[in-house]
Image (cartoon, coloured by chain):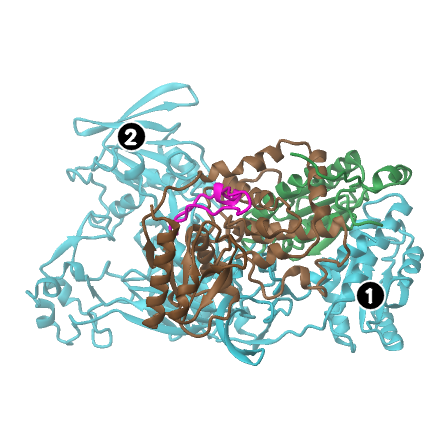
Amino acid sequence: MASTQDIQSAIRARAGKLLQKEVISCFIGWEAGRFEGQSSPLVVRSAADAQKLIYNDYCVQLLAKYLLTENCSEGKVGVAVRGCESRGINLALKDGQLQRENLHLVGIACQGVKDFSTKEELKKCQECTHRNPIIYDDLIGSEVTDGPRVEDTFAEVIELEALSHDERYEYWSAVFTRCIRCKACRDVCPGCTCNECFTDQAAMGWQGKQSSLAENANYGITRMFHSGERCIECGECERVCPARLPLMQINRKVLKDAYDIFGEYVVGIDDCTPNPLDTYLLEDVEEFM
Amino acid sequence: MSVDSTVQDPKQDTATAEDAKWKPKILAFTCNWCTYAGADLAGLNRMKYPADVRLLRVPCSGRVNPQFVLHAFLKGCDGVLVCGCHPGDCHYATGNYFTRRRMLLYRRFLEYFGIEPERFMVKWISGSEAGKFRDTVIEASEAVNKLGPNYKYREEGR
Amino acid sequence: MSRIGVFICHCGTNIAGTVNVSEVAEAAKSLPHVVHVEENKYACSDPGQNAIKQAIEEHNLDRIVIGSCSPRMHEETFRKMLSETSVNPYMLEIANIREQCSWVHKEKEVGTEKSIDLVRMSAAKVDRNVPLYSGEIPITKRALVIGGGIAGIQAALDIADAGFPVTLVEKEPSIGGKMVMLDKTFPTMDCSACICAPKMNEAGAHPNIEIMNLSEVEDATGYIGNFSVTIRQKAKYIDYDKCNGCGLCEQKCPSKVVSEFERGLAQRRAVYKPFPQAVPSKPIIDAANCRKINEDRCGVCHKLCGADAINYEDKDELITQEYGAVIIATGYELIDWTKLYGEYGAGAYPDVIDGLTFERLINASGPTEGKIVRPSDGKEPKSCVMIKCVGSRDPHKGKAYCSRACCMYGAKHAHQFLEKIEDGECYVFYMDVRAAGKGYDEFYMNTLEDGAVYVRGRISHIYPEGSQYVCVGEDTLSKKLVTVSADMVVLDTAMVAQESADTIGRLFGVTRNLDGWLTEAHPKLRPVETNTAGVYLAGAAQGPKDIPDSVAQASAAAAKVIGMFCKDSLESNPMICTVNEINCRGCGDCVDVCPYGAISTQSVDRRENSVWVTRTLAFINAGLCQGCGACTASCKASALDLLGFTNEQILQEVDALCL
């Protein structure tokens, strides 16, 4: 198992070499933040700048999103990919948002990232089922053992499902009341690639502008419907939420139901499996119809 | 699971007086080719059923975006019905297969957020099943009457 | 600002009897953008329509709501009415206050209240209506018929007789399908070949019919009136322009193989016509068994051919042609019972044969010239067991459905066996006898009189004993075990869909049911149409059928095609999907959802923020889209919308209800 220090040197070396040989026009990785234990995504455009790249236990940001939002100029883009990044990239490939031939993926077998203040592994990483990158062009070091099985990640959802309707309403209305609709969860989500989100399409009438439980729930439940079945479980929404809402409990509900009803299903495992709601089988279950 | 803040429905206490004259408001999305035709047939046969359900005509149950269902609940509907052709009979061949998946999941989602699943029904009613249409309306009306008004996530002032 | 007119129809007393029409009209006056409201005794009548037209002129209305009967009843009437005014026909919404209010609610207040709600919803929706215009779709007046069985032949002849060109595609070397293999047809006992062959010849000689034998449909694109179909013409190794069909090559060819047409009862050559009456009446070379092609030896046919028609270098050819309509008549196949019924020997007993093989045995032009003999030893069988429903009505091993024709051809076989074999014994094991058809039950009764012994029950197993076969089963009427020793056993096996129907169905967007039969648009009212406009079904491709039904359906499908070809152009449905190109992110989720293949993704270069970028966008083919709207619900970006039922319109309706 390679140490983070080894990985950092390897990223710098490979990014530098790729840029020097002009295989890629830029490389996306992380740089050190202002304070200790902070990091932020960095787009490197010259071999010399590759030395600014870092890798440590606190590189929490998901780079897949930056592939979609950064204007990376012409040519091929290099990017460091862990399990979650690779799933995000597969999702974007499926959605036609990226072209595989324009990417050079430097794989990192991820050992989980930590919260700097507590030095504990983030919850999203404890629950991570795919630590090794699923697709890559070259891999740094060797693969690591994967985390829990997919079925094991549904515990919180099962716990909530056991409550009564009114208890659940109480729980979720408390959650949605705290939502400030800053939409950071959407902005950071690698699955959210719409040019204009439903919530901003004021003329269409999907969403009003009031600050109310109804509109917050409207936003939360519709976001669940839009991105839940395409959630790669990177947990970024939960990480960036200023209100600390348990957003993964919402996404995991969709994943669990899709898994239970339509069969084994892991988002981003490849770039061709259709969304469960955009396909059907003649013999699909009918529960209450 | 802990609840951090105590959220009380603003309507819960004041609603009692209103409840007395409350009548259920149920919206039914019906596909043009089967269920809407079935409802027409029920009319033609002069069948009697409760007046709690309002039909909204769509070409196919596949047209029904689950967001419409949520919208209806937020705006003050006490129940929502989505009706289409039986699987295999869809006028557009496959529309209701997608409806089946979407609605199957969406009902679970709404239930997860605390909305009683009885408030959201999905039924296949063909153009010849006027009786089934009547029974579905009666069933929906009875279910919602039993549950009472829906205040969950409802927009204030509605 | 829209100017809405609301018209509430009394429908005599139909509505006014149980709904307070004046109260509904009064309530409508206060609805947003409603500038005029009036009541109407019979809105659909001429005076009623004139009153609405007059109100439109007088009050300068730009859209209307009519509270009346079901839109399924009179939407078209009122659209037509609007087309005679300045208002676009699609600026109309109908509130169904008859079928949904006055006819189903006894109490007047209840019906009135609900009517007001429905009118309010319609008014809210119509407020967001936009004018829609239907376009014109040109028609290529040429039809494609896929499958050259009796259904395909009949359909092609009907269309060709009406004066339109037809291409008849057949995957075998000759048209004729299954019917030409049969000996006689029930219940009239006409000679099958005698009634089928003239039709085949007529099709072969018809100036409007082009027969493409040994061909298969490879690809199809387009939509009603404008299909572009690619057909693979497989190498025939014979130049049909030169060949005069003398048949010398066939006589002299040294390579002998088992004849498919004779169901393995005889042999054919490598250069062959499957049967003497084949159409086209010219041979083909079976490349797999030709010595010249495989080993570069022989070449006898080339040497003998006076017309120099043999071409060993022939290659498959892809031909793309435009068609306005397509009829799929791919027919059926018999279920492969040898894989399913081990208890009947799984094909190991030579004298246990299926019905079609029996047809060749009793056929005067068959390998035995109509003499019934056992395939194993060539002796005449004295006793015969017929087993019905082999593979049919047997969901565990075969198919759950009834194959419809077997009861009758089973009776026919029994009749023929008893007629041809003196002192013959014939036992028919059946589940039920289904003889619903003109003259069918009479025919069955005659067979009983001929002496056929009908036993109600299935044969549980067959085993050989000496030269005979012992059939063991239960007579379920007497509840006794029955054992019959017979010289021959005929299995009336199930009809199953052709494998190629699956490919063809997929190419043209026609669904198959779980058993693989192509699905009609409506089982009762649109039995020959499919859900793809311009594609029709004929014969057993749609489900098991006998000859009269197949021919009837073929003519029905042809009538649909002729009806369409008689028009100069088609009117397109304007209530179809549109793409908001700004919002579309090109994910392609909608492409998978569309049942008609109407959506494709295309790369588009465009300027965004003064930079040229390449975007992938969904593109709707207006000719293919039928306006179901399934794609709109799959589009998270709401970039897809259905004209006439837009997201905005539906949300407005919901809001209006919840006021």
Q: Could you tell me the amino acid type at mark 1?
A: Ser
Give the main secondary structure, helix, strand or loop, of the magenta stretch: loop
Judging depth in this view, the residue of A71 and C640 nearest the camera is A71
Residue C462 left/right relative to C562: left
**What chain is tagged by disc 2?**
C
Q: Could you tell me the amino acid type at mark 2?
A: Glu
Judging depth in this view, the residue of A99 and A25 nearest the camera is A25
| Crowd around label 2: few <14 · some 14–19 · many ≥20 (10 Å) | few
Q: Which residue is mark 1?
A: C45
| Crowd around label 1: few <14 · some 14–19 · many ≥20 (10 Å) | few
**Picture coordinates of residue C2, whole percent (x, y):** 82, 71
**Picture coordinates of residue A266, whole percent (x, y):** 46, 47
**Does residue B116 appear anywhere in the picture?**
no
Among numbered discs 1 and 2, the one appearing first in the sequence? 1
Judging depth in this view, the residue of A224 and B136 nearest the camera is A224
What distance separates the C-alpha of mark 1 from that of mark 2? 70 Å
Q: Secondary structure at mark 1?
A: loop
Q: Which chain is cyan?
A: C
**Shade of chain A as shown in the rendered figure:** brown
User: Looking at the image, is mark 1 or mark 2 nearer the viewer?
Assistant: 2
Please tell me which residue is depicted at 60% across the width and 71% down the height of the picture.
C582
Please tell me which residue is depicted at 87% across the width and 70% down the height of the picture.
C51
Q: Secondary structure at mark 2?
A: helix
**Picture coordinates of residue A281, whole percent (x, y):** 49, 47
Depicted C594 relative to depicted C46: above or below: above
**Shade of chain B as shown in the rendered figure:** green
Depicted C313 relative to depicted C554: above or below: below
Residue C626 left/right relative to C228: right
Asked whether C254 falls inside the magenta stretch, the response is no
**Magenta segment:** A109-133
Mark linked to residue C343: 2
What is the quadrant of residue C83 in the picture? bottom right
